[in-house]
Amino acid sequence: MTTEQAPAIRVQGISKSFKDLHVLRGVDFDVTPGTIFALLGSNGAGKTTLVRILSTLLKADAGTATVHGFDVAAKAGDVRESISLTGQFAAVDEILTGRENLVLVARLRHLPDPGAVADDLLARFSLTDAGGRRAGTYSGGMRRRLDIAMSLIGNPPIIFLDEPTTGLDPQARIEVWQTVKQLAQGGTTVLLTTQYLDEAEQLADRIAILHKGTIIQNGTLAELKALLPPAKVEYVEKQPSLEDVFLTLVGEPDPAEPQTTETSAAAAAGKESR
């Protein structure tokens, strides 16, 4: 006899309006612990609003939601202790080094031996060699990996990633994808919002499509593909995509290799000269 595992996140009938603008209209879904759940939708679909409600930053008008077993309205403090939220843009201090950013957050969380916590996360995210450099010199992918590493300090069982690859180049996106996969493999539950179809396809165990404030479909990638008629099989020459060409020419990103953008390097050089 097996017992059913309680959802890491449960959303039932969540609604939210801003005056006459109805953003969420009765949203329902469950997220299984240790999985990646993608909330897919276009700009303005209500993804960020829902994440803000689940992370206790905003109150719903109707409905209920639990995160790690705690009601987001009645047990907001317990919810905050169980989660980490990474927004659309990396929240790192560019003046501090990567290691100093991590040590700062570990101290704010009152963890013992912040230096050891920082060193462990630098190694885990292949940032050890860059740990002594200012975060302002990091590439977009490295900065985002550092941002996610900062979010994991304290080992929260649930992490919200709100459009984590917005504005990143193809190599940086792959770096972030690799990081997200590693999180789930380590047992972390990930709720990911995205407007990129390929991102949801690459990462998610389940995908919910949010459209005009409601979930119009929820399932695995295979279940969603099964909604369409079987594809007609034709033998045609496959043409490479532009992304295939780009990554073939520049190479796949190496997480262990320090990367510095031209702009960041020039800015860093200017600061050093002063």
Image (cartoon, rainbow, N blue to C red):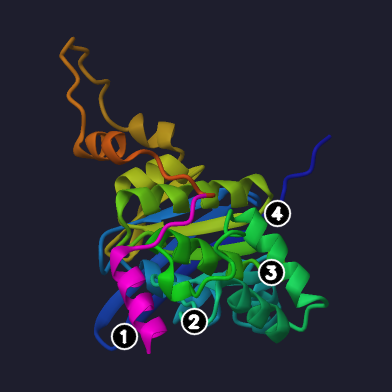
Q: Which of marks 4 and 2 is in front?
A: 2
Mark 1 Cα shell of 10 Å, populated few (<14), some (14-19), many (≥20): few
Q: Distance between the residues labelled 4 and 2?
A: 37 Å
- Which numbered disc covers residue 93? 2
Quarter the C terminus occupies: bottom left
At x 30%, y 55%, the residue is 169
- For this view, does 20 lie left or right of residue 258? left
**Foreground residue, 125 or 2?**
125
Amino acid carrying mark 4 in the image: Ala
The majority secondary structure of the magenta stretch comes to helix
Mark 3 Cα shell of 10 Å, populated few (<14), some (14-19), many (≥20): many
Amino acid carrying mark 1 in the image: Phe
Q: Mark 3 points at which residue?
A: 118
Q: Name the residue under label 1.
A: 18
Q: Distance between the residues labelled 1 and 4?
A: 32 Å
- State yes or no: residue 245 in magenta: no
Describe the element under mark 2 as helix, strand or loop.
Answer: loop
Q: Which of marks 3 and 1 is in front?
A: 3
Q: Mark 4 points at which residue?
A: 6
Amino acid carrying mark 2 in the image: Asp
Q: Distance between the residues labelled 3 and 1?
A: 40 Å
Looking at the picture, does residue 267 appear above or below residue 253?
A: below
- Which numbered disc covers residue 90? none
At x 29%, y 64%, the residue is 262
First in sequence: mark 2 vs mark 3 = 2
Q: Give the range drawn in magenta.
A: 257-274
First in sequence: mark 3 vs mark 1 = 1
Do the CB atoms of the residues marked 2 and 3 lie less than 8 Å apart?
no
